[in-house]
């Protein structure tokens, strides 16, 4: 290696070191100015919407002192990654909510309900489906989305109108049933939506059945024996019924 090549190598090495130092310095300074602005706007909106502008009350919810929050709001202290995620956890917000622009504290599939006294409840927004087209995600009805408790569903929760009285007296005609497609494991006594075993193209209209266990044997039945019964092998599960609502 010539002397000229050695000098070039040293120059490149120094440049790489400076780049690494610059990157490390930027990371230590915390979130970008744009991200910091977004998080701050969302925190300010949460204080206004959930606590009527009371910073102290908000502080009790997120377990932070008034002086700490004052520093955040006055931009003397950044809202870093760990703080943002901790706030979301304590406020029962979806991960990343504080990073969303336009200051939204909800996403298309979730809403936060204010119960008063600083208390909140998180709900999934479940779109409406038709049991005849349950597997076709292009036919779900978002305008008719309804809330279900966060603990009772997931982003795959849907609701539909129960037709007929095959599941009476548990579910009657007109009940709105919520079904979670992520809950497919059978539990004794719970109700499930699915089809008698058919190929995907021949599924047809889905039905509701109750899962009953007798030793190692499972049956999918109707409460009053009004409809056909199936073994676990004869029935394809879509999801479990998690709750119901009655239309007024």
Image (tube, rainbow, N blue to C red):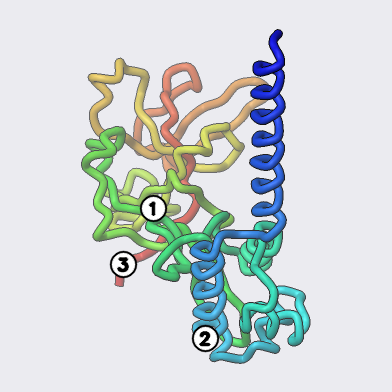
Q: Which label sits on residue 247?
A: 3
* Residue 224, quarter of picture: top left
* Residue 65, quarter of picture: bottom right
Alpha carbon distance from label 3 to label 2: 33 Å
Alpha carbon distance from label 1 to label 2: 35 Å
Residue found 31% across the figure and 67% down from its top: 247
- Is the residue 156 above or below the residue 107 in the image? above
Q: Say which element carries label 1.
A: strand
Residue 173, position in %: x, y?
A: 29, 55
Residue toward you, 65 or 227? 65
* Callout 3 crowding tier (Cα within 10 Å): few <14, some 14–19, many ≥20: few
Asked if marks 1 and 2 touch (Cβ < 8 Å), the reply is: no
Looking at the image, is mark 3 or mark 1 earlier in the sequence? 1
Residue 233, position in %: x, y?
A: 48, 17
Query: Which residue lies under the disc numbered 1?
Result: 177
Residue toward you, 243 or 110? 110
Residue 57, position in %: x, y?
A: 68, 87
Residue found 21% across the figure and 42% down from its top: 139
Residue found 43% across the figure and 68% down from its top: 104
Q: Say which element carries label 3.
A: loop
Disc 1 versus disc 2: nearer the observer: 2
* Callout 2 crowding tier (Cα within 10 Å): few <14, some 14–19, many ≥20: some
Q: Say which element carries label 2.
A: helix
Residue 27 appears left or right of 103: right
Disc 3 versus disc 2: nearer the observer: 2
Residue toward you, 161 or 228? 161
Q: Which label sits on residue 48?
A: 2
């Amino acid at each position: 290696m010539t002397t000229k090549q050695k000098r070039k190598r040293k120059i490149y090495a120094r440049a790489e070191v400076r780049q690494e130092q610059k990157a490390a310095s930027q990371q230590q300074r915390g979130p970008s100015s744009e991200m910091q602005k977004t998080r701050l706007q969302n925190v300010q909106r949460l204080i206004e919407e959930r606590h009527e502008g009371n910073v102290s009350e908000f502080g009790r919810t997120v377990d932070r002192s008034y002086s700490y929050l004052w520093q955040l709001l006055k931009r003397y202290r950044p809202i870093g990654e760990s703080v943002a995620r901790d706030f979301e956890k304590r406020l029962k917000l979806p991960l990343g909510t504080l990073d969303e622009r336009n200051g939204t504290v909800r996403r298309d599939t979730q809403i936060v309900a204010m119960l008063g006294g600083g208390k909140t409840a998180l709900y999934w927004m479940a779109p409406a489906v038709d049991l005849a087209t349950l597997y076709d995600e292009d036919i779900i009805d978002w305008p008719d989305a309804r809330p279900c408790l966060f603990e009772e569903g997931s982003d795959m929760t849907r609701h539909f109108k129960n037709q007929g009285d095959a599941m009476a007296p548990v579910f009657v005609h007109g009940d709105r049933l919520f079904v979670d497609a992520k809950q497919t494991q059978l539990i004794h006594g719970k109700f499930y939506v699915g089809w008698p075993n058919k190929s995907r193209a021949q599924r047809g209209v889905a039905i509701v059945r109750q899962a009953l266990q007798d030793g190692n044997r499972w049956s999918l039945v109707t409460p009053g024996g009004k409809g056909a019964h199936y073994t676990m092998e004869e029935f394809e599960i879509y999801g479990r019924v998690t709750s119901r609502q009655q239309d007024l």
